[in-house]
Image: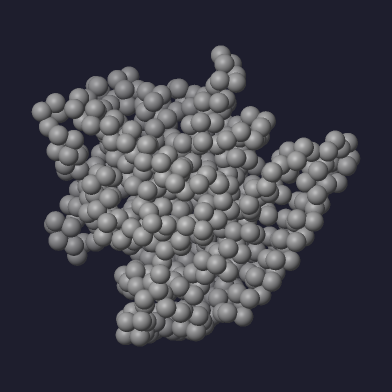
Amino acid sequence: MKTASLISILAASAVLTALAPLATAGPAETRRADAAVLALADDYFDRFLFPTYPTNATLSGVHLYDDRLEDLSKASIDRQVAALRAYLGRFRALPEAGLSDRVRGDRELMIASIEGSLLSLEVVRNWQKDPGLYPATITGSAFSIMQREFAPAAERLKALIARQKAMPGVLAAARANLVDPPRIYTEIALETMDGSIAFFRDDLPLAFEGVTDAKLKAEFAASNAAVIKALGDYAAWMKVDLLPRSNGEFRLGAKTFALKLKYDEMVDIPLDKLLEIGMADLRRNQAEFREVAKRVSPGKTAEQVMADLAADHPPPAQLLASFRDTFAGITKFIKDKRIITLPSEVPPILRESPPFMRATTFASMDTPGPFEPKADEAYFNVTLPDPKWDAARTAGFMAQFNYPVISNVAVHEAYPGHYIQFLWMHKLDDRVRKMVGASSNAEGWAHYCEQMMLDEGFGQPGHGGTDARAADMLRLGQLQDALLRNARYIVGIRMHTQGMSIEDAVKFFVEEGRQSKEVGEAETKRGTGDPTYLYYTLGKLQILKLRADMENKLGRSFSLQEFHDEFMRQGFPPIRIVRRAMLGDDSPTL
């Protein structure tokens, strides 16, 4: 479970207990019970979440705390834990009986978010383990002020300067907090430092060069220089002092991994069964890939076809344009086939991924917060190869951006994936559902869309495709991405609960997931700190089962567009809550 923010310290859900039948309540009693839950949720957001996580507030479109920065000191962490425990007690004290179905789910989501936050702060404890957390916090905080024009540039610059003055203190807190971090975490943090420093040195000044107030610009130059120096000193400290003593364990272990899944996604399937489900889906996708590859090139092996597919990509300089060129055909298909209601005709803005995101992210969607009143730009980020790389490394990196995969990523990130789900979130009148949700819903939806679009005919002759071979190539691209998500699923469980080595994880991505070595290395790094990134495949499988169950229930009256629209109306909670709303029961999600 997560709040709608790039800061993911607050992420989780509650242990789902057996659900007792709701007591019968009249409309007045129900309204009073609902109002109590929603009022406490407002109190939590307004008096705890936004003031404690100012970057979260900015990203959410709440601009009361734009001049503040997160306090990551040990004393602040202790205060957060105490506050979270108090809120948890207050939410639990509100009875479930008598609530409307919608608010019953909201109460679960709030309890869930708090339970997960406590797990993160008290058990996972990345604030003690991850040196990259601290530069990522200050960089993300500055980026949230820079990226959207929610206020005049001079006003935003004043807020940025106030935040910058607190940034060296965040890096000082890191030195006090970090205890025996995993070596891989320190290595990743060092790898991203050049990008973070370049962001402050190059991107921020450029973004505010139009400000004409000389005194303000001089103050910014001083605060910005202090941050650059503090980051440089922090990088040197990590390299000389922290790295040699970075011998900690990144693995969560089976108990914590299972709890995180239970809290974040409301999934309590035993890990051995969960791994069995993931392996079965991997084998299905591998078999289908071989079958489609044989149709595309009968005389070649699947590996040879994969190599041909990997080589068929645009030049790096044309990558953004290649993504942009997919939009018209995809949106036309969605409208023609009545896949889902499109709330807006405005496309997202394609751009290169910000420097501090490039080490572990190939493509992403950056949407304005659910309460943003003015700056409504949505950005589709794509990571380009570093111009300093040699030809071999660039080719390995670009292998993931072959033309069929570009189409698949556009479906995932934009239409009808993340961007469309974001647009639907702005239509909700439920503050809890705007702020709190699950990755298995958001990422599961986007991953489900990749397969669903092709299953409905996208890319076939007459539906954006030229011939059967072109359609098969699109299917290969979709399957390559599905295999990537399968590999994440299995590597995450095995690395964190079964002792799989980093080297074996990279090998699994390459050999079983059909990815390049460069992709395998980046994905494995991500998995050390994002242990439950199985949520892509997990969510997709849950949505497919929900759809099948809805089709079985409704028979001929089933409408794909109405199914998708109703799914969007639920927000992005765990699929268990969506199932209850759409099917009216608590049947298994898998």
| Residue located 46% across and 79% down the image | 178
Taking the image as shown, residue 580 lies to the left or right of residue 268, namely right
| Residue located 46% across and 38% down the image | 540
Residue 103 locus on image (x, y percent) = 73, 44
Residue 201, by quadrant, is bottom left
Residue 439 locus on image (x, y percent) = 51, 49
Taking the image as shown, residue 585 lies to the left or right of residue 156, namely right
Residue 216 locus on image (x, y percent) = 51, 79
Residue 48 locus on image (x, y percent) = 68, 66
Taking the image as shown, residue 535 lies to the left or right of residue 554, namely left
Look at the picture and state if 41 lies above or below 538. below
Q: Residue furthest left?
A: 299
In the image shown, does 425 or 508 lie closer to the viewer?
508
Identify the coloring: one colour
- The answer to whether residue 64 shows anywhere in this view is no
| Residue located 24% across and 21% down the image | 467
